[in-house]
Amino acid sequence: QVQLVESGGGSVQAGESLRLSCVVSGGSFRNYALGWFRQVPGKGRNERDFVAAINWSGTSTTYYADAVKGRFAISRDNAKNTVYLQMNNLKPEDTAIYYCAADYRRDPLVVVTTSREYNYWGQGTQVTVSS
């Protein structure tokens, strides 16, 4: 059974930073495509917005939503079965519940950016940014 547990959320002022972590247990972490999504109040699970994604190739190709490009960075540590989301220069519009997601991919080059393609999800961690 694959389980994902996020941590690192909190309340910060605009311009500050947070680092989210997501520990993945079960399955083969090094063969997972990984992603971060966020959900704001009033939107359902199927309306989670893509934030960032990373594949499992040796070069760890990444992809970001335009809204976070240049401010957020996704990374993975295969030795710790953990994916991170470093969030810098946070803005009030970044306020949301952040979810990590994982899915097995045979092709190491695949970067998955759509929520419906992920089979495994964490429980979410709240990030609140005040102005």
Image (spheres, helix red, strand yellow):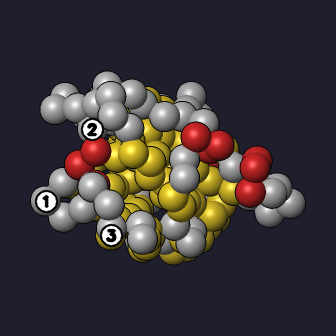
Pick whichever, 32 or 40, lies toward us: 32
Q: Residue at x 32, y 55 (%)?
A: 83
The alpha-carbon separation of the residues under discs 3 and 2 comes to 16 Å
Residue 62 got which mark? none
Question: Does residue 91 appear in this view?
Answer: no
Q: Position of residue 111 (x, y in %)?
A: 42, 30
Q: Is residue 4 above or below residue 92?
A: below
Q: Secondary structure at mark 1?
A: loop
Quadrant showing the N terminus: bottom left
Label 3 and label 1: CA atoms lie apart by 12 Å
Q: Which residue type carries mark 3?
A: Ser
Q: Nearer the viewer, mark 3 or mark 1?
A: 3
Q: Which residue corresponds to mark 3?
A: 25
Three-letter residue code for mark 1: Ala
Q: Residue beneath label 2, please? A: 56
- Helix, strand or loop at label 2? It is loop
Nearest to N terminus: mark 3 or mark 1: 3
